[in-house]
Amino acid sequence: MSCIGAGRVLYSAAIMPQRHIRSSRSCEAPHFQYHVSGELAIRMDDGTEFIAGPGDVTSLPSGHDAWVVGNTPVVTVDWFGASNYAKQ
């Protein structure tokens, strides 16, 4: 049996103004998350863009970027990518 972890993640405009904080251009960690508050703009490597907000569920494969829209912090519950987010 594999272990699945979930994490509550807080993104603020101060740490995600236009790009994730990492060395690569795109986030390579997949995410499956429920959006609790705030708005998160997401751009896939294929150019697809959308905004996720409260009540949305997103399933993001490797190869995406995201940033906070506005000044309201974004809170998500991530069932897949939280354990690897921002690891170096």
Image (cartoon, rainbow, N blue to C red):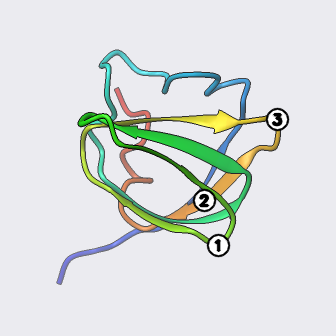
Observer-side mark, 2 or 3, equals 3
Task: Name the residue type under label 3.
Answer: Asn
In the image as oriented, which residue stretches furthest toward the top? Answer: 23
In the image as oriented, which residue stretches furthest toward the bottom? Answer: 1
According to the image, label 2 marks what residue? 76
Q: Earlier in the sequence, mark 2 or mark 3?
A: 3
Observer-side mark, 1 or 2, equals 1
Residue beneath the point at 56% across and 41% down: 41
How many numbered discs? 3
Q: Secondary structure at mark 1?
A: loop
| Label 3, label 1: how far apart the Cα atoms are | 18 Å
Observer-nearest of 58 and 85: 58
Q: Secondary structure at mark 2?
A: strand
| Label 1, label 2: how far apart the Cα atoms are | 10 Å
Task: Name the residue type under label 2.
Answer: Thr
Q: Secondary structure at mark 3?
A: loop
Task: Name the residue type under label 1.
Answer: Gly
According to the image, label 3 marks what residue? 71
Is 48 positioned to the left or the right of 14 in the image? left
Q: Earlier in the sequence, mark 3 or mark 1?
A: 1
- Neighbor class of circle 1 (other Cα within 10 Å; few <14, some 14-19, many 20+) is few
According to the image, label 1 marks what residue? 55
Residue beneath the point at 35% across and 15% down: 23
